[in-house]
Amino acid sequence: MDFELTQEQRVIQETAAKFVKDELAPIAAELDRTKDREKLKSILKRLADLGFMGINVDRKYGGTGAGSVAFSLAMTELGRGCASTTVTTSVTNMVAEVIQVVGTEQLREKYIPPLCNGAFAAGGFALTEAVAGSDPAAMRMSAVLDGDHWVLNGNKIFISSAEFAGVFVVWAVTDKEARKGKGISCFLVEPSFPGFRVGKEEKKLGQLASPTNEVIFDNCRVPKENVLGVLNDGFRIAAAELAGGRIGIGSLSLGIGLAAMDFARDFVKERISVDAASVNQQANQGLIANNYTRLAGARLALLRAAFLKEQKLYYAKEASMAKVYATEAANRACHDAMIIIGDYGYTDGCPVERYYRDVRVTSIYEGTSEIQRLIIARELLR
Ligand SMILES: Cc1cc2nc3c(=O)[nH]c(=O)nc-3n(C[C@H](O)[C@H](O)[C@H](O)COP(=O)(O)OP(=O)(O)OC[C@H]3O[C@@H](n4cnc5c(N)ncnc54)[C@H](O)[C@@H]3O)c2cc1C
C-alpha cells in the first residue's frame, strides 16, 4: 500500500485548492444569492481551461488523463469552495467519461472535446422521472425508431444544468416487451434537436447556483448514430455511470464538510485566545475531533473506491460505501459546525449557513443513502 499521491495528483489537488482560494471561494456566496448564470458559466470555462472537465478522460479527446483518484481529489478541493460549481463539474466529467467508455469513435470525437474544453458549458445526465427516481428501471420515457431517427417522448425531472448543458445523456425505453430494466437504451441528445425543451426550474434549499429543471421530450428526433452503447442495454450504462458519479458526489460532500469544520475550528481558536476559560471548550474539542476523524475515514473510503476504479477492478460496492459514509459524515460536520459557532452560524453572513444547505442533497442525488445501503447489502448478501 502506498498512501502517497503521485506528482500529477498533487499538482491537480494544489491547482484546485489555489483556484478555490483565489477565484471560487470569494464569489461563492454571491453566486448562491444571485444565481448569476453568466458568472457560473465563466467559472466553468475557467475550470475547463484548467483541465477539470475531463480529469479521467484520455488526452486524445482533450481530457487530462489523470485518473479517478485525481478526480476525487479535485472534487473535494473544489467542493470546499462552491458546491454548485462542483456538482456541475462532477456531472460534466461523468458525461465525458461515459461517452469515452461506451461511445463510438464518431461520438467520442464529436462530443468529448467540447465537454472538456468548455465549448459546452456543461454536460447533462437525464435519468430521473416522476415515477422513476430510486427505481430508474421504472422509467416511462419511450423511444421509437422512425427511419434514421429515434423519436423520444416523455419528461425527465430534476436535471442539473439543463438550462445550459451542450449535450445530455438520456435514457428511454426502446423495447416495451422486455423484462424490467432490459429494454432501456441510452442516447446523446443536443438541446438543438427538434422536440427538446427545458421546463420549469425547481426552487431548492441549497446548491442554488446550480439550476435544476424539468426536461421535456416532445417527439424529439435523435439521429440513429446517437445511440450510446448497445441498444436495449442502456440500464447497465446508467448503473456503471452512477457508480463512478458516486465517487464524485462523495468527494464533493467531503469538501463541504471539511470547509465547515475548518471554519468552526478557526472560530474556536479565535474564541480560545479571547476567552480561554470558555465553558464550551471541551465540548467543542470533542465535536472537532470526532468530525475530523469521520472526514478522514471518508477520504480513505473515497480514495479506495477511486483507486479500484482506476485499476479497472470492481468498485461499485466500495463507491456506494464511500458515498453513504462521506455524505453522512459531511452532513454531520455541517450540523456540528453550526453547534460550535452558534447564532452567527445560522446567518447568511457565515459560510456555514450555505454549507449546511448545500450538503443536504449530497445524500439524495445519484442515489439516496437508503439506496446505497441496499446496494451494499445486496453485494454482501449475494
Ligand atoms: C438538486 C437535485 C439535482 C438532481 N440532479 C439530477 C440529474 O442531473 N439527473 C437525474 O437524472 N436526476 C437528478 N436528480 C434526481 C435524484 O437522482 C433523485 O432525487 C434520487 O435518485 C432519488 O429519487 P426520488 O427523489 O424520486 O426519491 P424516491 O425514489 O421517490 O424515494 C423517496 C424516499 O424513499 C426512499 N426509498 C425509495 N426506494 C426505497 C427502497 N427500495 N428501500 C428503502 N428506501 C427507499 C428513498 O431513499 C427516499 O428517501 C437530482 C435531484 C436533486 C434534488
Image: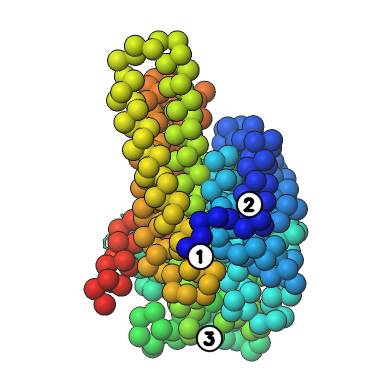
Q: How is the image coloured?
A: rainbow
Q: Which residue has dot 2 on it?
A: 10
Query: If you read the primary sequence from the N terminus, does the residue marked by circle 3 or circle 1 appear first?
Result: 3
Which mark is nearer the camera, 3 or 1? 1
- Callout 2–callout 3 Cβ contact below 8 Å: no
- Where does ligand 1 appear, by image quarter? bottom left
Residue assigned mark 1: 307
| C-alpha span from label 2 to label 3 | 40 Å
- In this rendering, does residue 162 appear at all? no
Position of residue 327 measured from the top left corner of the image (x, y, whole percent): 40, 49
User: In the image, is 28 to the left or to the right of 362?
Assistant: right
Q: Amino acid at mark 3?
A: Leu
Residue 231 marker: 3
Quadrant in which the C terminus is drawn: bottom left
Marks 3/1: CA–CA distance:
30 Å
Q: CA distance from mark 1 to mark 2?
A: 15 Å
Q: Earlier in the sequence, mark 2 or mark 3?
A: 2
- Percent position of residue 37, x then y: 66, 44
Taking the view exactly as shown, the residue that stands out farthest to the left is 381
